[in-house]
Image (cartoon, helix red, strand yellow):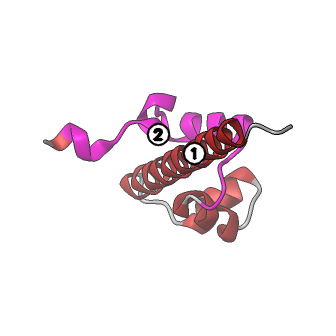
Amino acid sequence: MVNSAGCLKRQKGHKEMEEKKQITAQLIGKNIRRIRLENGETQQELGAFLGYGATTIANYESGYRLPDLETFFQIALHYGASLEDFIRDAEDDKG
């Protein structure tokens, strides 16, 4: 017998985790874009540095995809940024 309450609870937990993951991806993407623009680079230039196309960078910046850990490190090193710079909400720092 399947416990429907337990199943619903897992589904709700999974949905919440997916929503948080999407918010995190969007925040990281927003910060990649912000840091890239602060450094005067185009998506094409960052993509060329990483060996990817501009579409991949656009996907990162929109939160559609997340860079793998190695790529994430390469982006941070390229801009002299810390990983924390990509995961904090810059809007919160202004207030």
57 or 80: which is nearer to us? 57
Amino acid at pointer 1: Lys
Q: Residue at x 82, y 39 (%)?
A: 2
Q: How packed is label 1: few (under 14 Cα within 10 Å), some, or many (20 or more)?
A: few
Residue 42 percent across, percent down from the top left: 52, 66
CB atoms at circles 1 and 2 under 8 Å apart? Answer: no
Span shown in magenta: 64-93
Residue 7 percent across, percent down from the top left: 71, 41
Q: Is residue 36 above or below residue 75?
A: below
Quick one: label 1 or label 2, which is nearer the N terminus? Answer: 1
Q: Is residue 26 above or below residue 20?
A: below
Question: In terms of image quadrants, where is residue 64?
Answer: bottom right
Amino acid at pointer 2: Phe
* Label 1 SS: helix
Q: Is residue 91 above or below residue 81?
A: below
Can residue 70 be seen in the rendering of this structure?
yes
Which residue lies under the disc numbered 2?
Answer: 86
User: Residue 21 got which mark?
Assistant: 1
Residue 56 percent across, percent down from the top left: 69, 63
Specify the farthest residue to the right: 1
Residue 94 percent across, percent down from the top left: 17, 43
